[in-house]
Image: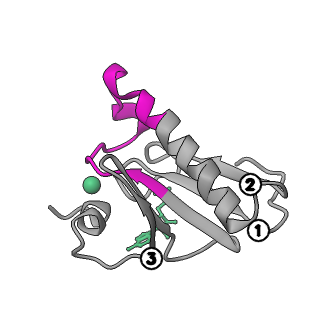
Amino acid sequence: MDCVFCQIVAGKIPSKTLYQDEEVIAFRDINPMAPTHLLIIPKRHIPSLAHLSDAETSLIGLMAKIANELAREEGISESGYRLVISSGEEGGQVVPHLHMHLLGGRRLSGKLC
Ligand code: AMP
Ligand code: ZN
């Protein structure tokens, strides 16, 4: 198991965890690109969004709900924030374990890519 996020789930790599339940864990990104930069991931190893099965689609809704709650806790719910899921090499995904970025706390670039 050399997946860095699976190791965070297993507690073998430390993380600043803000939330977890049976399915999902959320923690601070180690290299924040904005004042608030959190990652919301499934505990189960799913390599990317492209690997999500039809039976697992509700997981994305759950991750978005948790992101919204964390945005409120971070005080950026009203000012605004962005959720990003990169999938695959050309999508810019570096860690091959599905994750959602929650970014905010400053005015984000108007560029999507
Ligand atoms: P992506 O480019 O979408 O695959 O994003 C991967 C993110 O994981 C990057 O923003 C990294 O800074 C972040 N990251 C990598 N290793 C760790 C770690 N050990 N703890 C927290 N965040 C990490
Ligand atoms: Zn993994």
**Disc 2 target residue:** 81
For residue 95, what is the image quadrant? bottom left
| Secondary element at tag 1 | loop
Magenta residue span: 40-60
Visible residue check, residue 99: yes
Crowdedness near tag 3: few (<14), some (14–19) or many (≥20) residues, C-alpha within 10 Å: few
| Image vertical order of residue 34 relative to residue 24, above or below | below
Packing grade of label 1 (10 A; few <14, some 14-19, many >=20) is some
In the picture, the disc for residue 61 is none
Q: Earlier in the sequence, mark 2 or mark 3?
A: 3
Q: Residues within 10 Å of mark 2 (few under 14, many from 20)?
A: some
Across and down, in percent, residue 10 comes to 21, 66
> How many numbered marks appear?
3
Q: Identify residue for label 1.
A: 105
**Is 24 displayed left or right of 65 in the figure?**
left
* CA distance separating discs 2 and 1: 7 Å
Residue 40 to residue 57: above or below: below
- Mark 2: amino acid: Tyr
Asked if labels 1 and 2 touch by Cβ distance under 8 angstroms, the answer is yes
Q: Amino acid at mark 3?
A: Lys
Residue at 41%, 52% (x, y): give it: 41
Mark 1 and mark 3 residues within 8 Å of each other at the beta carbon? no
Q: Secondary structure at mark 2?
A: strand
Left/right placement of residue 84 relative to residue 59 reads right
Per the image, the residue denoted by label 3 is 16
Mark 2 or mark 1: whose residue is earlier in sequence:
2
What amino acid is labelled 1 in the image?
Gly
Q: Nearer the viewer, residue 11 or 94?
A: 11
